[in-house]
Image: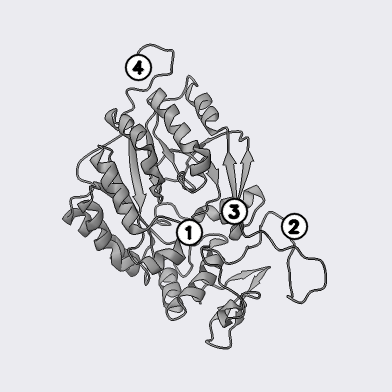
């Protein structure tokens, strides 16, 4: 590897059976530890903000040890704020709302994993198992929108974690947020990998008539074996196409996010994904190139060697070639698309097939002119 993976708790050692470097405690590459099916991450990375951590160094240890509960836990919180200003020019949004922190979908590549360390958890299994539920999300959004200086700039749901992840079935926070947006005529965008969005089709349809909502469905692969291990608790590609079809038929502007494109794993599927999305009613697209920032690189490297040992080295080096010899880049304008011949090939495909299938044709924007605070007469603009 060009980029040496080094972290206090994660020192790579040579694996005897195939020469691939693995981390101490990751013995399941040799079949001595069971693979955690249904989870993207297979261990907890060290939280860079914590000075101390509890670890089990030896399976035969005689000291008292309590194994972590493998189930998912919802941690209810009274958040202090809910609308976040987005500084990055690469993500196509100015503000985002995330009713949940952490995500049970378990996508191994998710950049939001690193944010979970701010909550005192690991970016690994903790991110998938310990979900922060901001129970006062709708109240906070209402307080934000009534501010005199607010100008109805569109807000993105799921700027960090999926607003329709499994927790939504119980808490319905996303539904409550959309109800507030509908009441204020606040423009909102949605990005999801979950078919639960269809439960709010009635509300989305009402908002769509006012042109104050737009939805995107994330599709990374039609290879079900790849999806099952890469993003284990998301909807299947077939279900996602059904979502696109139903939302589009209901008059809701719907598009797709192909992210991330990973060379050697799913980049060859771009044309098929775009065509299928178009055939089911999608009218716009976006994509991102894989980048492995922070603790995500350790998790992804471990996952890649466990699931695709035959091509792990090739995939890793292709990612490095597209980020200047590293697996991540912090430069705005480049970090989400990569650079070099591999990244350019994917960008050229995106441009070619987008034109071929009539995606992103013409100007379209959410309507800000209807915004009005309840109880006030007239329009803001």
| Residue marked by disc 2 | 51
Quarter holding residue 25: bottom right
Residue 114 horizontal/vertical position (percent): 57, 54
Q: What is the crowding at mark 4: few (fewer than 14 residues within 10 Å), some, or many (at least 20)?
A: few
> What mark, if any, has residue 379 been given in the picture?
4
Q: Which residue is at the front of the view, 167 or 334?
A: 167
Residue drawn 66% across and 61% down? 46
- The tag earlier along the polypeptide, 2 or 3, is 2
Looking at the rendered structure, the secondary structure element under dot 4 is loop
Disc 2 crowd, CA 10 A, few/some/many (<14, 14-19, 20+): few
Which residue is painted at 29% across and 31% down in the image?
A: 211
The residue to which callout 3 is attached is 72
The mark lying in front, picked from 3 and 4, is 3
In the orientation shown, which residue stands out farthest toward the right?
A: 63
Point out the frontmost of discs 2 and 3. 3
Q: Residues within 10 Å of mark 1 (few under 14, many from 20)?
A: many
Residue shown at 52%/67% (left/top)? 37
Give the spatial CA distance, label 4 vs label 1: 42 Å
For disc 1, the marked residue is 107
- Quadrant position of the C terminus in the picture: top left
First along the sequence among labels 1 and 3: 3
Q: Quadrant of residue 249?
A: top left
Contact flag, marks 4 and 1 (Cβ < 8 Å): no
Q: CA distance from mark 3 to mark 4?
A: 44 Å
What SS does tag 1 mark?
Answer: loop
Q: Is residue 239 above or below residue 154?
A: below
């Amino acid at each position: 590897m060009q980029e040496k993976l080094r972290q206090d708790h994660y020192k790579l050692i040579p694996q005897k059976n195939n020469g691939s470097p693995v981390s101490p405690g990751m013995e399941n590459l040799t079949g001595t530890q069971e693979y955690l099916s249904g989870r993207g991450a297979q261990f907890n990375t060290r939280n860079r903000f914590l000075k101390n951590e509890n670890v089990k160094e030896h399976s035969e240890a005689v000291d008292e040890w309590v194994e972590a509960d493998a189930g998912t836990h919802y941690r209810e919180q009274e958040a202090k704020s809910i609308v976040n200003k987005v500084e990055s020019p690469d993500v196509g949004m100015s503000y985002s709302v995330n009713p949940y922190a952490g995500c049970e979908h378990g996508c191994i590549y998710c950049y939001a994993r690193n944010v979970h360390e701010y909550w005192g958890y690991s970016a690994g299994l903790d991110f998938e198992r310990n979900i922060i539920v901001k129970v006062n999300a709708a109240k906070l959004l209402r307080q934000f929108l009534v501010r005199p200086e607010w100008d109805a700039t569109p807000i993105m749901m799921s700027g960090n974690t999926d607003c329709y992840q499994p927790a939504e079935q119980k808490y319905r926070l996303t539904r409550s947020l959309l109800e507030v947006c509908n009441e204020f005529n606040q423009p909102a965008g949605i990005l999801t990998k979950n078919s639960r969005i269809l439960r709010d089709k009635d509300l989305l349809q009402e908002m769509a008539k006012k042109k104050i909502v737009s939805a995107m469905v994330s599709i990374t692969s039609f290879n079900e074996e790849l999806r099952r291990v890469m993003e284990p608790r998301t909807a299947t590609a077939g279900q996602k196409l059904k979502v696109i079809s139903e939302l589009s038929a209901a008059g809701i502007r719907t598009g797709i996010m192909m992210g991330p494109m990973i060379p050697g794993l799913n980049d060859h599927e771009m044309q098929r994904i775009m065509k299928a999305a178009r055939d089911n009613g999608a009218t716009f697209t976006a994509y991102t190139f894989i980048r492995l920032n922070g603790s995500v690189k350790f998790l992804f490297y471990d996952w890649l060697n466990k699931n695709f040992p035959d091509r792990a080295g090739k995939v890793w080096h292709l990612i490095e070639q597209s980020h200047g010899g590293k697996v991540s880049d912090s430069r705005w304008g480049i970090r989400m698309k990569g650079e070099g011949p591999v990244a350019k090939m994917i960008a050229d495909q995106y441009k070619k097939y987008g034109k071929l299938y009539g995606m992103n044709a013409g100007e379209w924007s959410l309507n800000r002119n209807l915004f009005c605070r309840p109880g006030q007469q007239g329009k803001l603009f």
